[in-house]
Image (cartoon, coloured by chain):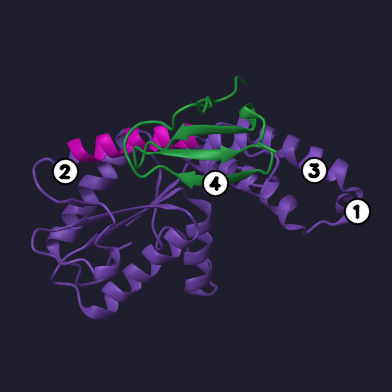
Amino acid sequence: MSKKKSDIVQTKNPKTGHYVKIDRGKGEIISHKKSEGPYKGVPVARKRNK
Amino acid sequence: MTKLGKRVPQVVSEIRYRLTTFLVTNGVPVIDASHTLTGKDFLLKIWNIILSVPLGIAIVDKSMNSSTLSNIFYEVGLMQAYGKETLIIKTKGTKIPSDLVRTEYLEFDETFEGELKKYLYSLLELADHYETLADQLENNPLLAIDFLRRSYLISGDEMLQDKANSIYATYANEAPMLRNINNCVEKLLAAFSVPPLGKKSVVKSI
C-alpha cells in the first residue's frame, strides 16, 4: 500500500543547496537529492509558526 | 582551535585578532580553551566546550608543527562527529589533510571579513533548516530534539527549548516508564539550556 502523500515532504538544505526527503510518519530522513531542484510531486515543508 | 601559548606565528595572532574583533562586533561571543581555568583535565574542558557550541573555527598555518596540527584536526573531526559546524581558516600555501579537503575553508587575505560575514549569514539559514527538520521529525523524538538543540545553539531562540520540552513531554506520556528515569537520552537531550557564560549563542573559536 502506498503512503499518504502528506507523510512524505521535502526541505532544502541551505548548506548543500540540495533537497532532502523526509518520512514524517516514520520520523526519518529517507533520501538526499543529488541533482538541482526539488523532488517532483513532493510538498515542500516550511518552518512551523511559533 | 589553533596554537595557543607562546611562539604563536605572527600571522596566526593577526588572524585571531581580526577574527575576534569581527565576531564580537557582530554580537557573536568567542570562547577558546584558555578562556577559563577549571583546574581539571584539559581535554575534558575541550570536550565540554565543543559540546556547548554550534561552530568551531580552526586556524592553521604552514609554520605549525605536526603535533599542533594533529590537535587541531582531532578537534575539527570531533566537532564534525558531533554534528557541529566547522570552519577552517588557513593562510596561503597551507595544506589541509586529505580527509578534510572537502571541508570548506577560508583563506586569510583581504576578502577575509567579507567572506566571514557571508558564512555567518549562512549559519542563520542553517538554524532555520534544523528547526524545519525538527518540526517534520517529531515522530522521532531523539532526532527532533537534537535538531532543535543544534538550531538553538546557533540562534539562541528560547522558544526552541520549549519545543524540545514539549516533544519530550509528549514522548514521555506515551512511554510512562520514562517519566521516572532521570538520565534517559531523550531527557538529557531535551535539557539543553543556556550556553556557558550566559550568552545567547556561543561560537567556539581559536
Mark 4 or 2: in front is 4
Q: Is residue B151 depicted above or below B82 in this figure? A: above
Task: Give the residue at mark 2.
Answer: B112
Task: Give the residue at mark 1.
Answer: B177
Rendered hue of chain B is purple
Local packing at callout 3 (Cα closer than 10 Å; few below 14, some 14-19, many 20+) is: many
The chain letter under disc 4 is: A
Q: Are marks 1 and 2 in contact (CB under 8 Å)?
A: no
Q: CA distance from mark 4 to mark 2?
A: 37 Å
Q: CA distance from mark 4 to mark 3?
A: 22 Å
The chain letter under disc 1 is: B
What x and y, as percent, mark residue B64?
A: 19, 73
- For badge 3, the amino acid type reads Tyr
| Sequence-first disc among 3 and 2 | 2
Q: CA distance from mark 3 to mark 2?
A: 45 Å
How many numbered discs? Answer: 4
Check if residue B121 falls in the magenta segment: yes
Task: Give the residue at mark 4.
Answer: A30
Task: Give the residue at mark 3.
Answer: B171
What x and y, as percent, mark residue B41?
A: 53, 75
Q: CA distance from mark 4 to mark 1?
A: 30 Å
Mark 4 or 1: in front is 4
Provide the residue span drawn in magenta.
B114-129
